[in-house]
Image (cartoon, rainbow, N blue to C red):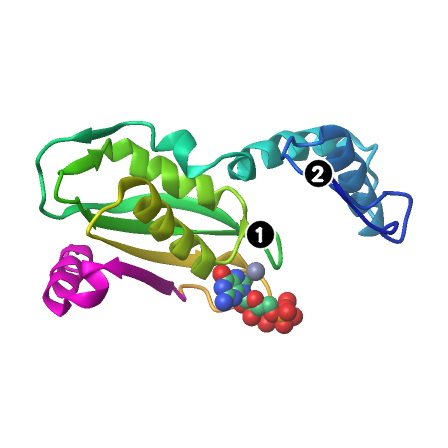
């Protein structure tokens, strides 16, 4: 099913696709329009292939829209390990949904396996971050979604997610504050209920420089 609405004010109909196949032709048309709107010549040498390049780039940048956590959390095994697992400094690149410019930084993700000791492959946690980062995002939602994705699919005793990022919409334009870092966190289960567990994780996350 598609959500169909009124025309969007020009000849591009407002149809929001239900499943997220990137419509290259539509992106190309829109990018050409933007180039014309800023007073550029979309036919000049350097720009002629730009609409197609942007379409390919967006396919990659927004690939997470077509993915679910279960697509990447495929390997779950019982290792009998019931202590904290923490993956620090997972590099992330996302796109600010307000300005469609990048924000980028690091995610730190920890969890405590359940009593069966169910864990997942380390790379799967990093892949999960990408599933949610490769969408139009705000940092708070990205943080929450990673935490909730792990809770739902690994059923751990707790999860902590801390994301530190720099938003280009705050540095290259607008308020122009280069270097400002936004730090967000989401804690679930034992990390929410037990101060000591949360402090241990925070000191592992922050005490590395
Ligand atoms: N909470 C939150 N805000 C964000 C994020 N990314 C960008 N923003 C902010 O979204 C806000 C959008 O504000 P608006 O006033 O609607 O847009 P704007 O006129 O472009 O705002 P300025 O950036 O202040 O020029 C700005 O304050 C951005 O800094 C994010 O991940 N989380
Ligand atoms: Zn922004």
Q: Position of residue 9 (x, y in %)?
A: 89, 53
How far apart, in angstroms, are the residues tagged by discs 1 and 2? Answer: 22 Å
Query: Which residue: 28% across, 61% down?
Result: 187
Give the residues drawn in magenta, as a range: 180-209
Query: Which residue: 11% across, 31% down?
Result: 79
Instruction: State which tag comes first along the sequence, 1 or 2.
Output: 2
Q: Quadrant of ligand 1?
A: bottom right
Residue 44 placement: quadrant: top right
Say if 200 sits above or below 10 in the image: below
Residue 22 placement: quadrant: top right
Category of crowding for the residue at label 1, using alpha-carbon neighbours closer than 10 angstroms: few (below 14), some (14–19), many (at least 20): some
Q: Is residue 208 magenta?
A: yes
Report the side of 150 relative to 57 (left or right): left
**Is residue 174 something that shows in the picture?**
no
Which quadrant, please, contains the C terminus?
Answer: bottom left
Say if 152 sits above or below 180 in the image: above
Query: What number is the disc on residue 120?
Result: none
Query: Which residue: 9% across, 44% down?
Result: 82
Q: Under tag 1, what secondary structure? A: loop
**Is residue 19 something that shows in the picture?**
yes
Query: Which residue: 30% across, 39% down?
Result: 125
Q: Under tag 2, what secondary structure? A: loop
Query: What number is the disc on residue 17?
Result: 2
Disc 1 and disc 2 in contact, CB within 8 angstroms = no
Residue furthest out toward the bottom: 175
Q: Nearer the viewer, residue 13 or 59?
A: 13
Q: Provide the residue designation for mark 1.
A: 101
């Amino acid at each position: 099913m598609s959500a169909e609405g009124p025309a969007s004010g020009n000849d591009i109909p407002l149809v929001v696709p239900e499943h997220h196949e990137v419509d290259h032709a539509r992106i190309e048309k829109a990018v050409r329009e933007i180039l014309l709107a800023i007073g550029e010549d979309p036919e000049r040498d350097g720009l002629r292939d730009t609409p197609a390049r942007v379409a390919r780039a967006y396919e990659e940048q927004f690939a997470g829209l077509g993915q679910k956590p279960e697509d990447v959390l495929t390997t779950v095994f019982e290792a009998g390990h019931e202590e904290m697992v923490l993956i620090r400094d997972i590099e992330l690149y996302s796109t600010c949904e307000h300005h469609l410019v990048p924000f980028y930084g690091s995610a730190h993700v920890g969890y405590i396996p359940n009593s069966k000791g169910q864990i997942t492959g380390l790379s799967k946690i990093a892949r999960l971050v990408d599933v949610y980062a490769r969408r139009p995002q705000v940092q708070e939602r990205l943080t929450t979604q990673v935490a909730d994705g792990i809770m739902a699919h690994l059923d751990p005793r707790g999860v902590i997610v801390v994301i530190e990022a720099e938003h280009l919409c705050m540095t290259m334009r607008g308020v122009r504050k280069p270097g400002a870092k936004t730090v967000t966190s989401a804690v679930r289960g034992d990390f929410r209920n037990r101060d000591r567990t949360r402090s241990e994780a925070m000191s592992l996350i922050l005490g590395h420089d």
